[in-house]
Image: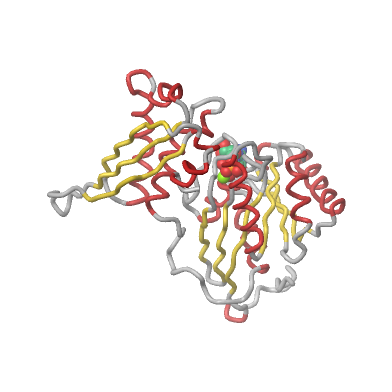
Amino acid sequence: MSDRSPSSRPTPPAESAPHRAGFACFVGRPNAGKSTLTNALVGTKVAITSNRPQTTRHTVRGIVHRPDAQLVLVDTPGLHKPRTLLGERLNDVVRTTWAEVDVIGFCLPADQKIGPGDRFIAKELATLRRTPKVAIVTKTDLVDSQALAEQLVAVDRLGKELGIEWAEIVPVSATAGTQVGLLADLLVPLLPEGPALYPDGDLTDEPEQVMVAELIREAALEGVRDELPHSIAVVVEEMLPREGRPADRPLLDIHANLFIERPSQKGIVIGPGGSRLKEVGTKSRKHIEALLGTPVFLDIHVKVAKDWQRDPKQLRRLGF
Ligand SMILES: Nc1nc2c(ncn2[C@@H]2O[C@H](COP(=O)(O)OP(=O)(O)OP(=O)(O)O)[C@@H](O)[C@H]2O)c(=O)[nH]1
Ligand SMILES: [Mg+2]
């Protein structure tokens, strides 16, 4: 299905290639580097990332604009064996997304042996016969060329074993920026022909309120240990321009609730004398101001939503 010309021939003039537009979805186990790759392709932070598994909790669309194509990247939560109702919901989201996209990018970290988690996903991908699948070996900066070569062979073998025909196998490093452009070049020909789906310049279709909540959650994830990352949820309750400000010195008031699951977690999030919460506020405010292009007054309240990951009513309230 590829319309790429062989590399020996000069690239045809742009007007001869049809414009393409469509959706590519990155899947992979938690922590595989899906969100980091999405951000690298879009060229800006549309999805939060962290070194904790299960950072992404809903699908985030990042939009890549090119003269020849519009590539909409759908970043999904990492697919995993669910232990909570939240986990089940996240997996449902991922599977629904698979059915809707034009191409799937299966992310496998270069620095980790293909394991049961990857196989679990690959087996499911094998059942989606029609959708082209690209295997993406991520985090190549973490391994030497020998280890990378072995991983590429292992990915090829995994495909053969499960009857998946990879449209491409691409090694990339999102943090070093290696082969990120090439990946876009390889995904575009797999999209259907058609006009752009989103207005020029839009980088995501995430509502601002959600982006802001995610930036706060990202800052809160930093430095907390053990199970706490999974317990944190953030909801922005209100975003309002401060009244009575001069036009050249606006201020946006943002009120957010940071939920945890148990009263005992409150102290960890707030820190001695409120130091941790203050840090979370300072860090996320910088990102929020960059995102919105306006000075911000950020007010974060820590609240307990008892066992929200397992409670359907609470999940609904928190937007899942
Ligand atoms: N060295 C290196 N680290 C990377 C690269 N890509 C991602 N990481 C790191 O890997 C960790 C996980 O990255 P994410 O992008 O949050 O992973 P994810 O697949 O979106 O994870 P979930 O949302 O939890 O499913 C973060 O600490 C990233 O900084 C890369 O190319 N090189
Ligand atoms: Mg993610």
Whole-percent x and y of residue 116? 77, 39
Reply above or below: 304 against 60. above
Q: From the viewer's perspective, is 148 left or right of 252? A: right
Residue occupying the point 70% across, 71% down: 4
Q: Position of residue 164 (x, y in %)?
A: 81, 57
Give me the residue at 30% from left, 41% from top: 255
Image coords of residue 32 (percent x, y): 64, 42
On-image quarter of the N terminus: bottom right
Q: How many marks?
A: 0
Residue 179 rendering spot, x and y as whole percentages: 64, 53
- 198 vs 33: above or below: below
Question: Ligand 1 is located in which of the four quadrants?
Answer: top right
Residue at 69% across / 52% down in the picture? Answer: 106
Give residue 128's quadrant in the image: bottom right
Res 114 quadrant in image: top right
The color scheme shown is secondary structure
Is residue 176 in sight in this rendering?
no
